[in-house]
Image (cartoon, rainbow, N blue to C red):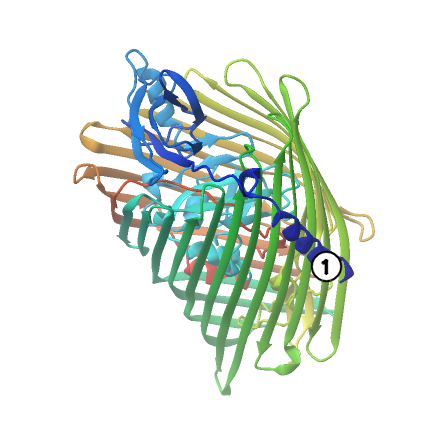
């Protein structure tokens, strides 16, 4: 606790110091009026942003100011003295554009709106390359998948989008892994309270039409929270600021689910207001579920088999409202409120044989998720390019409910009813401050401090099973970016995190766990000839178990497959080394990487035989620290244009799985996991476009068993209408197979648990989208809580609930 108090005291000291940081580094006495000029640079043919376009502000043929556009095409020139200028925009392969602009003391700021650049003669090939690269962008520190450019996403949800992102693997429940390891999922750079219990369910709450892009960060520096063994995934939604009024409307209807999304952006002067609303409804559909449990307890063998179905539906909505205000050219304030509501559940029935005795189970399940996130951010810059100070705060509060009933009917025996009810509450408070100081054009220091305070309670109908949990995390970091040589850029950092945990389970079990960790990071990047880059990185990461893993309450919504958490879990600690290579060859994009990962105290689910109060032997599913895992792997992504309007792309990733524990004499042996993705997109005349895609995920291994291979495939056709402001299209998913058959098997020396699910995956859909206005994208600095390991499967029995909600 002392470390946390010292951290907060440090925040106060930093705030006091920065309060004396004059705007722009100038003395307050200086009152000369200056303003800024902003613009958005787009390709006239593709309407895509042009990053790194060169901008020069000239007067009397002499340059007085300048800059380059960012990855969103936006450029802002600060400290412009009122006068008349020529605003000159140029980029290789495009015709130079000159715009006359005049500012006055009364109106020192000018927004030039959208400036379109047209291709120059003889450079059509380069223009086509830029347009085709829009779907996948390979940045220095991340890979970006532009979901809004993929027409096959219409009608799906965020988990469907994730399946098409290079290096990611997603199971049928929506659980995401990056190169075979856990990841931290953010939304617009921030955590969301809806992720507190289930990442898979939270992803299903986001219609695909709301997603702009997905960023994959495999080698985060010490500036990021240390959570996520494999790295960080950041989902960017279509919540953008725009000059004037603009927005979009999307709707889709299909045989599996219906989606709707609405985004509205209003900007006037220094004030921008954004709002969005998304809704999702999945039809009730039958999933066939067959389970088998064998266990040996005290020398007595027990066999339980179930054969039935689950008919679940899903309904949810999410909305947000944000405000962004530039006090002046150096001070900015923004705030955002986001709400989520989601329900998932339905009836089911099973024929049950317990050691040869027949019964029937009529069951019902209802889960609800409600959450509110509120954040406020203040950012201050100066005339020194790159200098920035920020303060952020965030509140997340959520309430989750789970109610189930099981009615057993047996010939000649009175009906037996088993009921359960749980209400979970999650309150999270975060405070963060960051400061960036450029010593020179090649050397920059980034530093900051952060505090996260979590208060979680879980109330059940049986008070002795209530669970209260507190987790506080204090952290500080420093990252130095510099030129190691003329061709090699380095970024070295160190992050310190102190975690304090205490809780009460029922009336008897008190637990606490404090630990302090250091997380170094190092990234070396060298640019070779042409557009080739080689990158070597190292970092240490952590996976703290979340409430789902820790809660000792025994969930018996499926009485023959009970589940409970383990409050004594230790966090996973991982060391990662990666070597990456990327290049562009005649319009083709190639990105390859090899990596090594060492993880201690790996957290995995485990089955344990036990006898319940009625004397029936069962398998209990819980979570334990299995041991140490060493994993080697590689990933290759490529994109090729056989013709200017035809794009082919593919991704293949492979990694080893192995767990060892000398104390328990555990050695799983070495297994290979892989995932592959392929896509073909072709643009036709008249505004028509087509796409085909497919995904394969290999069998997933655990120390006790495996889940069978899964594959998904689909296609779409889209037509531009209403002067290219709207599109209408159709899409299909797994059209040649109604069900996806997934089998999961877990074994120990004395127990067996198998689940065989036939999930209705095939779907056909019709979608429509309409865009209005001229969008300008902005990305604000914000809080990022990246420190909790989320569960991989919320529903027992192979994830029946997650499946029906998909």
Q: Nearer the viewer, residue 107 or 455?
A: 107
Quadrant housing residue 722: top left
Pick the front one: 237 or 449: 449
Q: Give x and y (percent) for residue 726.
A: 22, 42
Q: Quadrant of the C terminus?
A: bottom left
| Residue located at (50% from left, 56% from top) | 376
The location of residue 643, given as percent across then percent down, is 32, 19
- In percent of the image, x 68 and y 61: which residue is there? 472
Assign the N terminus to one quadrant of the image: bottom right
Considering depth in this image, is 669 or 455 the residue closer to the camera?
A: 455
Compared across the picture, whether 271 is left or right of 300 comes to: left
In the displayed orientation, state which residue is furthest to the right. Answer: 663
- Residue 602 visible in the current orientation: no
Residue at mark 1: 4
Q: Position of residue 660 (x, y in %)?
A: 76, 46
- Image coordinates of residue 21 in percent, x first then y, are 60, 44
Residue 92, relative to residue 592: is it above or below? above
Is label 1 in a helix, a strand or a loop? helix
Residue 454, by quadrant, is bottom right
Q: Is residue 368 above or below residue 421?
A: above
Residue 759 vs residue 265: left or right?
right
Mark 1 surroundings within 10 Å by alpha-carbon count, few (fewer than 14), some (14 through 19), many (20 or more): many
- Residue pictured at 36% horizontal, 15% vertical: 61
The residue closer to the viewer here, 694 or 120, is 120
Determine whether, in the image, residue 222 is placed left or right of residue 733.
right
Query: Could you tell me if residue 64 is visible in this image?
Result: yes
């Amino acid at each position: 606790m002392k470390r946390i108090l010292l951290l907060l005291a440090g925040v106060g000291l930093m705030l006091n110091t920065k309060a004396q940081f004059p705007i722009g580094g100038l003395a307050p006495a200086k009152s000369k009026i200056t303003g800024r000029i902003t613009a958005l640079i787009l390709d006239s043919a593709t309407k895509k942003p042009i990053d790194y376009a060169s901008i020069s502000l000239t007067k009397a043929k002499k340059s007085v100011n300048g800059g380059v556009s960012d990855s969103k095409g936006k450029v802002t020139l600060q400290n412009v003295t009122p006068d008349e200028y020529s605003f000159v925009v140029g980029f290789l392969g495009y015709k130079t554009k000159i715009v006359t602009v005049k500012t006055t003391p009364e109106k020192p700021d000018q927004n030039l709106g959208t400036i379109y650049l047209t291709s120059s003669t003889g450079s059509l090939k380069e223009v086509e390359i830029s347009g085709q690269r829009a779907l996948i962008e390979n940045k220095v520190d991340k890979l970006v998948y532009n979901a809004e450019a993929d027409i096959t996403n219409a009608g799906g949800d965020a988990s469907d989008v994730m399946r098409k992102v290079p290096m990611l693997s997603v199971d049928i429940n929506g659980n995401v892994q990056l190169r075979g390891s856990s990841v931290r999922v953010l939304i617009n750079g921030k955590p969301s309270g809806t992720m507190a219990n289930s990442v898979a369910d939270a992803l299903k709450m986001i219609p695909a039409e709301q997603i702009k892009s997905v960023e994959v960060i495999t080698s985060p520096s010490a500036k990021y929270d240390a959570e996520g063994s494999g790295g960080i995934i950041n989902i960017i939604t279509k919540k953008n600021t725009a000059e004037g009024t603009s927005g979009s409307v999307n709707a889709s209807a299909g045989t599996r689910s219906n989606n709707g999304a609405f985004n509205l952006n209003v900007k006037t002067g220094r004030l921008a207001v954004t709002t969005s609303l998304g809704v999702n409804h999945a039809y009730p559909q039958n999933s066939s579920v067959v389970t088998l449990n064998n266990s040996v307890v005290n020398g007595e063998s027990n066999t339980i088999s179930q054969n039935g179905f689950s008919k679940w539906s899903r309904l949810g909505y999410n909305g947000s409202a944000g405000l962004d205000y530039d006090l002046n050219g150096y001070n900015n304030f923004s705030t955002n409120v986001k709400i989520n509501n989601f329900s998932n559940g339905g009836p089911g029935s099973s024929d049950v044989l317990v050691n040869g005795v027949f019964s029937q189970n009529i069951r019902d399940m209802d889960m609800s998720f409600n959450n509110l996130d509120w954040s406020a951010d203040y950012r201050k810059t100066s005339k020194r390019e790159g200098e920035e100070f920020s303060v952020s705060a965030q509140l997340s509060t959520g309430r989750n409910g789970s109610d189930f009933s099981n009615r057993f009917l047996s010939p000649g025996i009175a009906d037996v009813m088993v009921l359960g009810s749980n209400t979970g509450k999650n309150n999270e408070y975060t405070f963060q401050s960051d400061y960036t100081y450029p010593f020179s054009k090649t050397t920059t220091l980034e530093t900051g401090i952060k505090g996260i305070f979590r208060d979680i309670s879980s109330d059940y109908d049986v008070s002795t099973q209530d669970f209260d949990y507190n987790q506080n995390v204090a952290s500080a970091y420093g990252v130095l970016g510099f030129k190691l040589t003329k061709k090699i850029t380095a970024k070295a950092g160190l992050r310190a995190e102190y975690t304090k945990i205490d809780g009460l389970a029922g009336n008897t079990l008190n637990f606490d766990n404090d630990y302090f960790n250091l997380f170094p990071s190092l990234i070396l990047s060298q640019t070779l000839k042409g557009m080739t880059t080689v990158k070597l990185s190292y970092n240490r990461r952590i996976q703290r178990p979340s409430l789902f893993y820790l809660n000792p309450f025994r969930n018996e919504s499926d009485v023959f497959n009970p589940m409970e958490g383990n409050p004594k879990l230790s966090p996973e600690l991982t060391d990662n080394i990666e070597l990456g290579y990327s290049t562009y060859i005649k319009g083709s994009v190639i990105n390859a990487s090899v990596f090594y990962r060492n993880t201690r105290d790996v957290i995995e689910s485990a089955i344990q035989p036990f006898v319940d109060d009625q004397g029936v032997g069962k398998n209990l599913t819980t979570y334990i620290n299995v041991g140490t895992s060493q994993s080697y792997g590689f990933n290759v992504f490529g994109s090729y244009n056989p013709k200017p309007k035809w794009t082919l792309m593919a991704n293949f990733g492979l990694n080893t799985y192995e767990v060892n524990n000398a104390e328990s004499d555990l050695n799983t042996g070495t297994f290979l996991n892989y995932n592959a993705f392929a896509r073909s997109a072709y643009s036709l005349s008249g505004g028509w476009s087509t796409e085909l895609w497919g995904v394969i995920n290999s069998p997933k291994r655990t120390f006790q068993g495996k889940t069978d291979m899964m594959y998904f495939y689909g296609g779409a056709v889209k037509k531009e209408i209403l002067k290219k402001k709207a599109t209408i299209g159709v899409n299909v998913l797994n059209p040649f197979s109604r069900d996806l058959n997934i089998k999961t098997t877990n074994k120990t020396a004395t127990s067996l648990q198998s689940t065989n699910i036939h999930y209705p995956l095939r779907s056909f859909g019709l979608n429509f989208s309409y865009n209005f206005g001229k969008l300008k994208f902005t990305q604000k600095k914000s809080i990022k809580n990246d420190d909790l390991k989320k569960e991989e499967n919320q529903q027992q029995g192979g994830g029946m609930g997650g499946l029906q909600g998909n």
